Image: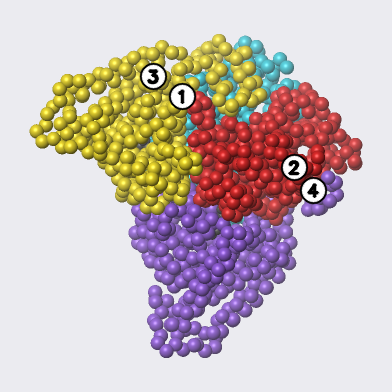
Chain colours: A purple, B red, C cyan, D yellow
């Protein structure tokens, strides 16, 4: 793909990574960003109902995803679309989720950005902060009990460190030495709440000290540093040396979600300051120093991503709503009589009614 | 009704006003919750409070509902009057233990020596395309918990008047705010801080009628009104609409009186039907008014499933479904 | 019914046996909870399991119900079949968020891709002089939560048979064990691991009758039996006793059929009356069987207060109160 | 009270304490132990329904109670009878609680050992592990908000460090710098669960590192060390220097409660080993070294305590059950119609029935 910029004094690529690896990471981060851009745009255009993005946090996702293999599990929050993509959840599947259409794996039941990928070992995302943390530990306990191979990466934000499930998750992991890695994406905000109002501790990684295992803080904008730390944590977990709390220090460069207005609680300068360490730029600079950078990456990968995205959006939008009978399945493995009655009642009497438009009913 | 004494407000505006008024009235009133300070709450219900009353009395809490309610109980024991915000009712569950085990039982278990009259405000209900975890209606859990009062307004004026009563009272209140109505309608709201308080306890007959009583609350009142209008105009059915306002303790006399008059009853709520609040209304009538009942007591409720996103308009009770229930009980 | 195939057991013994059998049958079954290992559980329901199956499959957990249920969900997602013990039902509330937000909704929200068929066993109910926090009956909260199955046995054989079905099933179960009955009665219990499973779903007519149906479960079945015997011998009233066994999903057809026959209904439970499970039974009847009802549907329940210590014998439904209810509905 | 044993080389009494202070502490510890002995005995005799004692943990109670004054608050668990006694909750009131009789402050509603003392700033005890921790922090936040004097001592066991309320309590305290002292009574067991299965951390005091404030471990069997640490923590709290986690390392020398059989999970030798450092002996040895010990203390204070206890038991036992109308009050400040109906129903129909004896109803 075109010629490389040749650097005069090449640094070696660290952590056992190849040039191809670096390119793959860069490309995955570009795709993540393009995906987020599109998500917000679709929301602003009123084509999807909600979006929450990870702008500025791409390295936390791709660095940790790159450390995983098929046996590993990812228990994420709503802010890791890059992981789902990298794990191989088809872009079309993700777009169908954003449109909550009839092809959506979860049948339009969840808000956008709540992905599910059984095959990818990507747990169905919850909106409830923190619940996946202890669940991830339980999954890792399961791996250990069964003597299987694999580790669990369980993601959380700085805000989530205050949640009950963080405490129980960290504690159960410490006691059981389950093969789990807590990926703490410290983007310094929980909606409007800054870290200083979330905890009195200076370094979030220090929270591991309460649970008897290792916590380390890593530059979350440097995908190579993230990858190295994740690999190290994974090696320790697999060797039975216990869990790791990996604090990835970064910055939520966008709004909390499409419902949020960050100008109410922080300045544009602050955000610009952080963007000087944009994870894409950080990796680009690394690649330049390794002598493996190609200027076309910047444009090609974006174009490639946008083409895929445009296609996926078109297809997702062409698909209608889930059919009404999806309202009544998957509550249990069977359909209870009560639910069957409710289905029957609605199907018999309301199919065809224009329920969205209540205009016919005067107030 | 001089224009000088009222101002037209949304429900959010009315809630915000009530908080301003009560914080100004009583320096023991404090507000706490996630993002309630600088950000004014994700719905802006607490907008401006921190600027006015300072960071001591308007606290941005860490992300822990356990902590919000637990610390509020401690503050109340000390003599403050905490008004805690839970960002969405869907996120009240991490605080469930503090609410059910502690808040509800403190007075009883201490023989009245300790009390914790905390007010917990929380937006609830569907209709805003919030899906699974931004739409739930968990009121029945709290109504089944002796020691709690459960209050739900359906208009801006009621929201202000009930919230003020809740803050002035000496018993804990779970105050559910129908977020679908936050900005959807405006109403004249009293501006005199001592005017137009709405008492906790009695239900409110929104529209008297003679053929069928419909019990409802929150965003469902409007849905019922639409259905009742159609029933009146199309079928000449006279619907009595009863807005419960206080779900717990229930105004038993009020609902029984209504059914003694009409002989037919429907309950409408958004929460799943099974063991929902409607069951209590039906059961109360089956126990105390069966001789007046000329038709089955019908519950129009949310489905017995989690709350969906795309199809929420099918899931939630809507005027057509309520209208159908009216037809059914009239035809019985 | 050869003696070789049954053994006389207490309910605790039967539960313990069920756990042994299912752990032996399926190596994916694991048990976790506070003090369940070396100590065999504070009630000894898990006695001997750790010695037999090892520390990996019988885990003494840290003191966190959030952690117990949350980790069990994770294990279930991985493919294990966790049977979690919550030491007392009164301590299930710290796990409420994991149960209501996650356990109940996992299958639905993931379109069936992820499931968490955890069984949560927990002793519940009064009658052991446990006071405020060792006596509660929180079943209604869980019955109002779509996605959960709620099961309550009333005999040793049912406890074993239902628990085994729960463990073999693919949906989450909240399995409430009436601790008052743990050691109070013995019954012949099958010893063949594949025999005498009791299906989740149908209610069970303990005693057929023609005059009044009494719906009950757990420790109340015996209370109802006493009252029914007196009504039969003193007043010649024929009571049909229906042990619900599975509270959620409710066997609607079963309860309606009973009332179609008797025309009268009483519900008995220990939990507070308001929004208790009895309300659902009453409401179901008021909706589906009102034309058969010859008397009010009476709920005999715990008081709408927290659970007391000294006076628990007044608080809890007792035979005299149930008998009075029978007299009332017969005299109506 | 008789002559003192004179020691040849007297050590000075530390921490600004006087001889009278030491005697008072010793006496309070003796009373606590005698009270616990009596409690267990009453339970075994079937005269009360339940008991949970603090045998071996007397120094944790008296040392921290001695540091408090009237403005301070005590949010305890069920295992701190010595605090209630020391704060001035009348022995008779406590005994009435054990008998759950008609004079019981809480009207026989709670199990024994769940004391309540409004005047003593002694919070109504909950059975639910940990709930008082965050409530204590809230109370301390209240003190701070109102600019009042006073600190809150909030007690918890080693097991309770795993609870949600510990996490939120520690975190809120750290962030708000509320004047609160977490008194962590590490008696090494949560019922049968040893510390090693509770947490992977070696020193529980280290848990404070997750919350950005000071944690210290103190010999919980040395009342003087406990007192000194508590005074220090209190001084810091009052000075606005923030909360302290005070780990008092001790040993639960008795059973968890009258329902527990410790022989199922630990050896008698282990317990005997710990009893070599019986807190009463530790203080006695201190007092000998200060030259202020009097041999009669050992017997006199026990006799004094037993006399008081005997009297209180007699009086408590002479009092009947709470009247039935107490079932219906204090749910709210008012009586709801529903509850009034329930009261009326029961009073009209059941007063006089022998409800305790169901014999009249054949099964
Ligand atoms: C239990 C719970 N409480 C509150 C919320 C509302 N809420 C959604 S996201 C959020 C902030 C989360 O912050 P953080 O953990 O730092 O993650 P980030 O959004 O920064 O990735 C809050 C409070 C929630 N989803 N769940
Ligand atoms: C939330 C909750 N879960 C479980 C229990 C049952 N339980 C009562 S005491 C106890 C152990 C407490 O241990 P610790 O905190 O160390 O206090 P200790 O009894 O040793 O003083 C347990 C598990 C409870 N009371 N509350
Ligand atoms: Mg964050
Ligand atoms: Mg302990």
CA–CA distance in space, label 2 to label 1: 52 Å
Whether discs 4 and 2 lie on one chain: the answer is: no
Mark seen at residue C129: 1
Q: Position of residue D6 (x, y in %)?
A: 12, 29
Left or right side of D38 for B200: right
Q: Do the residues labelled 3 and 1 touch (CB within 8 Å)?
A: no
> How many residues crowd mark 4 within 10 Å: few (<14), some (14–19), many (20+)?
some
- Quickly name the residue at label 2: B189
Mark 3–mark 2 distance (CA, rounded to whole Å): 55 Å
Task: For marks 2 and 1, give the one nearer the viewer.
Answer: 2
Q: Determine if the C-beta at disc 1 is less than 8 A from ligand 2.
A: no
Q: Residue furthest left?
A: D8
Residue D21 on image: x %, y % = 26, 30
Q: Which of marks 1 and 4 is in front?
A: 1
Mark 3 burial class by Cα count in 10 Å: few <14, some 14-19, many 20+: some
Kindly indicate whether the residues beneath marks 3 and 2 are on one polypeptide chain.
Answer: no
The quarter of the picture where the N terminus of chain D appears is top left
Pinpoint residue B299: horizontal percent, then vertical percent: 73, 37
Query: Which residue lies under the disc numbered 3?
Result: D92
> Residues under labels 3 and 1: Cα distance?
22 Å
State the CA–CA distance, disc 4 to disc 2: 38 Å
The residue that label 4 is drawn on is A350
Q: Nearer the viewer, mark 4 or mark 2?
A: 2
Q: Is mark 2 on a helix, strand or loop?
A: strand
What is the chain identity of the residue bearing mark 2?
B
Q: Which of marks 4 and 3 is in front?
A: 3
Residue at x 65%, y 41% (from the top left corner)? B21
- How many other residues sit within 10 Å of disc 1, few (<14), some (14-19) or many (≥20)? some
């Amino acid at each position: 793909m075109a010629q490389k910029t040749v650097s005069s004094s090449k640094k070696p690529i660290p952590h056992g990574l190849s040039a191809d690896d670096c390119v793959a990471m860069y490309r995955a981060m570009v795709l993540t960003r393009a995906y987020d851009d599109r998500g917000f745009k679709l929301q602003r255009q009123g084509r999807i109902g909600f979006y929450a993005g990870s702008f500025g946090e791409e390295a936390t996702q791709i660095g940790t995803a790159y450390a995983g293999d098929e046996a590993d599990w990812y228990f994420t929050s709503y802010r890791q679309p890059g992981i789902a993509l990298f794990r191989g959840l088809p872009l079309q599947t993700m777009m169908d989720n954003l449109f909550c259409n009839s092809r959506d794996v979860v049948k339009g039941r969840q808000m956008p950005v709540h992905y599910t990928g059984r095959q990818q070992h990507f747990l169905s995302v919850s909106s409830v902060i923190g619940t996946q943390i202890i669940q991830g530990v339980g999954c890792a306990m399961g791996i250990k009990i069964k003597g299987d191979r694999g580790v669990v990466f369980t993601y959380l934000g700085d805000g989530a460190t205050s949640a009950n499930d963080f405490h129980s998750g960290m504690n159960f992991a410490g006691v059981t030495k389950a093969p789990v890695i807590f990926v703490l994406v410290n983007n310094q905000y929980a909606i409007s709440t800054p870290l200083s109002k979330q905890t009195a501790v200076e370094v979030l990684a220090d929270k591991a000290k309460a649970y008897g295992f290792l916590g380390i803080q890593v530059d979350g904008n440097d995908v190579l540093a993230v990858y190295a730390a994740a690999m190290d944590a994974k090696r320790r977990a697999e060797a039975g040396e216990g869990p790791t709390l990996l604090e990835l220090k970064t910055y939520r460069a966008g709004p909390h979600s499409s419902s949020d207005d960050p100008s109410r609680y922080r300045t544009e300068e602050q955000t610009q300051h952080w963007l000087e360490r944009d994870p894409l730029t950080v990796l680009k600079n690394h690649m330049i120093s390794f002598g493996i950078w190609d200027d076309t990456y910047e444009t090609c990968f974006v174009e490639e991503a946008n083409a895929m995205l445009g296609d996926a959006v078109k297809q997702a939008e062409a698909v209608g709503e889930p059919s009404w009978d999806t309202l009544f399945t998957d509550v249990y493995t069977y359909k209870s009589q009560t639910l069957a009655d409710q289905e029957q009642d609605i199907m018999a009497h309301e199919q065809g009614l224009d329920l969205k438009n209540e205009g016919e009913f005067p107030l | 009704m001089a224009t000088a004494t009222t101002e037209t407000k949304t429900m959010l505006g009315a809630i915000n006003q009530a908080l301003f008024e009560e914080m100004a009235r009583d320096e023991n009133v404090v507000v706490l919750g996630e993002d309630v300070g600088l950000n004014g709450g994700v719905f802006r219900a607490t907008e401006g409070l921190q600027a006015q009353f300072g960071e001591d009395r308007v606290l941005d809490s860490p992300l822990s509902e356990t902590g919000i309610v637990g610390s509020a109980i401690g503050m109340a024991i000390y003599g403050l009057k905490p008004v805690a915000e839970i960002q969405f009712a869907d996120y009240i569950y991490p605080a469930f233990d503090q609410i059910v085990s502690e808040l509800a039982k403190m007075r009883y278990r201490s023989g009245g020596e300790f009390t914790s009259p905390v007010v917990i405000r929380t937006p609830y209900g569907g209709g805003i395309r919030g899906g699974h975890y931004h739409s739930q209606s968990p009121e029945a859990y709290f109504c089944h918990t002796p020691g709690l009062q459960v209050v739900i307004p359906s208009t801006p004026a009621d929201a202000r008047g009930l919230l003020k009563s809740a803050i002035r009272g000496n018993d804990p209140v779970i105050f559910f705010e129908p977020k679908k109505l936050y900005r959807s309608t405006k109403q004249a709201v009293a501006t005199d801080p001592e005017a137009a308080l709405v008492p906790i306890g009695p239900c409110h007959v929104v529209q008297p009628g003679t053929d069928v009583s419909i019990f409802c609350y929150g965003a469902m009142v409007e849905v019922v009104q639409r259905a009742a209008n159609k029933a009146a105009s199309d079928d000449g059915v006279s619907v009595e609409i009863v807005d419960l306002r206080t779900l717990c303790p229930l105004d038993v006399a009020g609902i029984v009186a209504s059914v003694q008059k009409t002989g037919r009853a429907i309950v409408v709520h958004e929460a799943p039907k099974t063991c929902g609040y409607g069951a209590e209304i039906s059961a109360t009538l089956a126990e105390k008014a069966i001789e007046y009942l000329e038709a089955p007591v019908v519950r129009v409720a949310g489905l017995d499933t989690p709350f969906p996103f795309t199809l929420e308009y099918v899931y939630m009770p809507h005027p057509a479904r309520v209208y159908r229930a009216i037809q059914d009980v009239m035809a019985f």
